[in-house]
Image: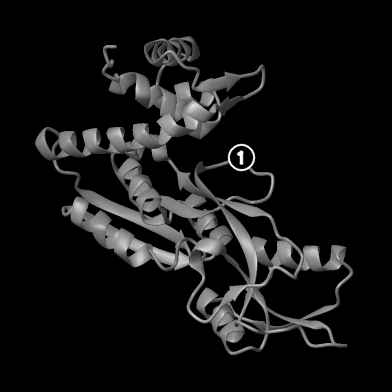
């Protein structure tokens, strides 16, 4: 059996459709017609002799083979693009004003940004860390170019990077006080994690009291580490001294995404997304 060579152009179309959830959005990102992208994905499936996408009238979904291919395709495209940038493309210069939500891979953020800065040595990188909704408001009024943050519940804006479970955390062995309201440490009002957590407690009929509020994620984590209260974090960002507490009401997941004009900054956005994914793996 002759093993076929995968066409990077076909893989790029497949990745865009898979990541953006449909042929229309994938075609728009690539600057192609929907029919052209559909044809390229069909050619890829014929080459592999396997279906990689399940299509319906409203959406597409990855097959099991498609999930496997997506991981390889991302790596192949990232390596190809890195080689082209190094050998062919002129160095990227200018300034990138990047907003990063403090819930966004807090343990991995510094190494990711250091690697990104080394990848684009002539690009001036300015980073602002804060709360998702405040950073996105800054991006919408032109104060930031891109934002790495959380999607609001039910929202479809932004380019998804990964989905992360939201979990209750407290020190190992910590137990809610008997006969008293559950003490919780939270970010200020407007935080999606706060809204999700308090709504879950209310639905479960659990009494609670916000005993500690901080505008800093490190502040609420410190309160939990000291045993003052339970709090909620993304599973990828648990600091030392905190563990999940599954006895409290489930909180679902949060979608982390890139917000901004990613289409016109693809040479910057694609390597950044790939570095984030690699750090999580």
The residue indicated by pointer 1 is 156
Q: Is residue 190 visible?
A: no
Q: Quadrant of the N terminus?
A: top left
**Rendered position, 211 above or below 111:** below
Residue 11: percent from left, percent from top: 36, 24
Tell me if residue 111 comes above or below residue 22 in the rendering. Answer: below
**Residue 52 appears in the rendering:** yes
State the image coordinates of residue 105 (x, y, percent, origin top left). Answer: 45, 62
Q: Position of residue 212 (x, y in %)?
A: 67, 84
Q: What color scheme is it?
A: one colour
Residue drawn at 28 percent across, 58 percent down: 125
Q: Residue at x 34, y 41 (%)?
A: 270
Q: Residue at x 40, y 21 (%)?
A: 31
The quarter of the picture where residue 92 lies is top left
The answer to whether residue 189 is above or below residue 152 is below
Looking at the picture, tell me which residue is in the foreground, 83 or 126.
Answer: 83
**Of all residues shown, which one is farthest toward the front?**
1
Q: How far from the left and from the top, in percent, is residue 135?
A: 50, 59
Q: Residues within 10 Å of mark 1 (few under 14, many from 20)?
A: few
Q: Residue at x 79, y 88 (%)?
A: 177
């Amino acid at each position: 059996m002759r093993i076929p060579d995968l066409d990077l152009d076909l893989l790029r179309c497949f990745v865009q459709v898979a990541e953006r959830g449909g042929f229309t959005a994938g075609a728009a990102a690539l600057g192609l017609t929907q029919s052209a992208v559909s044809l390229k994905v069909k050619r890829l499936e014929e080459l592999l002799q396997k279906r990689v996408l399940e299509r319906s009238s409203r959406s597409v979904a990855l097959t099991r083979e498609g999930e496997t291919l997506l991981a390889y395709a991302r790596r192949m495209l990232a390596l190809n693009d890195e080689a082209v940038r190094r050998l062919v493309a002129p160095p990227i210069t200018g300034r990138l004003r990047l907003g990063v939500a403090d819930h966004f891979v807090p343990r991995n953020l510094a190494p990711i940004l250091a690697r990104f800065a080394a990848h684009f040595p002539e690009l001036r990188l300015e980073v602002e860390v804060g709360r998702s909704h405040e950073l996105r408001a800054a991006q919408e009024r032109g104060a930031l170019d891109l934002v790495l943050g959380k999607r609001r519940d039910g929202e479809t804006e932004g380019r998804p990077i990964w989905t992360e479970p939201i979990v209750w955390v407290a020190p190992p062995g910590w137990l809610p006080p008997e006969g008293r309201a559950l003490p919780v440490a939270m970010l200020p009002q407007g935080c999606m994690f706060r809204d999700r957590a308090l709504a879950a407690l209310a639905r479960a009929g659990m009494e609670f009291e916000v005993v500690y509020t901080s505008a800093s994620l490190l502040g609420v984590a410190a309160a939990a580490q000291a045993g003052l209260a339970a709090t909620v974090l993304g599973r990828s960002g648990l600091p030392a001294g905190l563990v999940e507490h599954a006895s409290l009401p489930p909180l679902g997941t949060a979608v982390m995404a890139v917000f901004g004009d990613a289409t016109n900054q693809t040479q910057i956005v694609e390597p950044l997304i790939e570095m984030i994914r690699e750090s999580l793996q």
